[in-house]
Image (cartoon, rainbow, N blue to C red):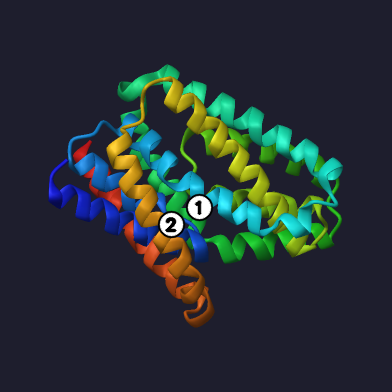
């Protein structure tokens, strides 16, 4: 790696760590830097996933007090996360870079749309729950399984997707849902990372630089979360996602 690549990756990891601590979307920052320096989209996706897993583990650990008395209740969600991570990662490895590259603009656009509409998604789900829609929980479990597979395959915007489905299952208890969401997302991504490593997709120098930047960014993100409204961080993430989607669509 050149010094320029190291510096840009460290900055991207830092920005991604801040974004993940406040609103999510950290992969929007590191993924394009890796691709810009010649890494295949498949390897960049896998390496980015490795770069942000430590932050995900730290967030899950922070919620330990809220979850340690609910382990039996959380077990089904944990199994969904693991199964989804395995399926998504194997699907990604199976299609290879030639199959994954054409999906990148669409995945970036989908994740950007999820972030942009997150407020509307939450309010709609809340209204859906209050109305007691028939089979709402069954639909939510199915959507959660699909979200977990998406998490193993790509992952940007996964937290919002899972939290929206959990709002139905947990019946509006945000803190319980958020703690459960962190566990499911962490397991889906960590399981996928194990398979990415096994498949030889991870570029460790780039991953380690991203990890270091993300750790500092995650710590600083706590300060940002206390002083900067989440909406401003989300606006930045959406803007970055929109630009990246356009760039990758133009690249073909």
Residue 248 position by quadrant: top left
Judge from the rendering whether residue 113 lies leftward or rightward of residue 148; answer left or right. Answer: left
Tell me the residue that label 1 is attached to. 55
Judge from the rendering whether residue 78 lies leftward or rightward of residue 94; answer left or right. Answer: right
Mark carried by residue 2: none
Tell me the residue that label 2 is attached to. 215
Q: On screen, 87 above or below 71?
A: above
Judge from the rendering whether residue 161 lies leftward or rightward of residue 235; answer left or right. Answer: right
Image quadrant occupied by the C terminus: top left
Image quadrant occupied by the N terminus: top left
Tags 2 and 1 touching, CB below 8 Å = yes
First of labels 2, 1 by sequence position: 1
Measured as percent of width and height from the top left, residue 191 is found at 57, 31
Measured as percent of width and height from the top left, residue 120 is found at 60, 64
Residue 2 appears in the rendering: yes
Mark 1, other Cα within 10 Å: few <14 / some 14–19 / many ≥20: many
């Amino acid at each position: 790696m050149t010094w320029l690549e190291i510096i840009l990756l460290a900055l991207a990891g830092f920005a991604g760590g801040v974004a993940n601590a406040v609103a999510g979307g950290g992969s929007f920052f590191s993924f394009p830097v890796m691709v810009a320096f010649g890494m295949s989209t498949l390897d960049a996706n896998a390496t980015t996933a490795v770069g942000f897993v430590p932050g995900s583990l730290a967030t899950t650990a922070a919620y330990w007090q809220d979850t340690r008395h609910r382990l039996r209740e959380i077990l089904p969600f944990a199994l969904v996360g693991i199964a989804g991570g395995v399926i998504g990662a194997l699907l990604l490895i199976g299609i290879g870079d030639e199959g994954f590259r054409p999906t990148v603009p669409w995945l970036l656009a989908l994740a950007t749309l999820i972030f942009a509409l997150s407020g509307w998604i939450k309010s709609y789900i809340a209204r859906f729950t209050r109305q007691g829609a028939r089979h709402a929980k069954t639909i939510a479990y199915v959507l959660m399984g699909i979200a977990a597979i998406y998490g193993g395959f790509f992952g940007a915007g996964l937290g919002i997707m899972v939290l929206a489905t959990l709002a139905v299952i947990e019946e509006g208890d945000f803190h319980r849902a958020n703690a459960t969401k962190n566990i499911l997302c962490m397991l889906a991504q960590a399981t996928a990372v194990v398979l990415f490593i096994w498949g030889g997709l991870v570029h460790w120098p780039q991953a380690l630089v991203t990890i270091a930047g993300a750790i500092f960014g995650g710590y600083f993100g706590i300060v940002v979360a206390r002083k900067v409204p989440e909406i401003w961080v989300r606006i930045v993430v959406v803007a970055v996602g929109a630009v990246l989607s356009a760039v990758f669509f133009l690249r073909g």
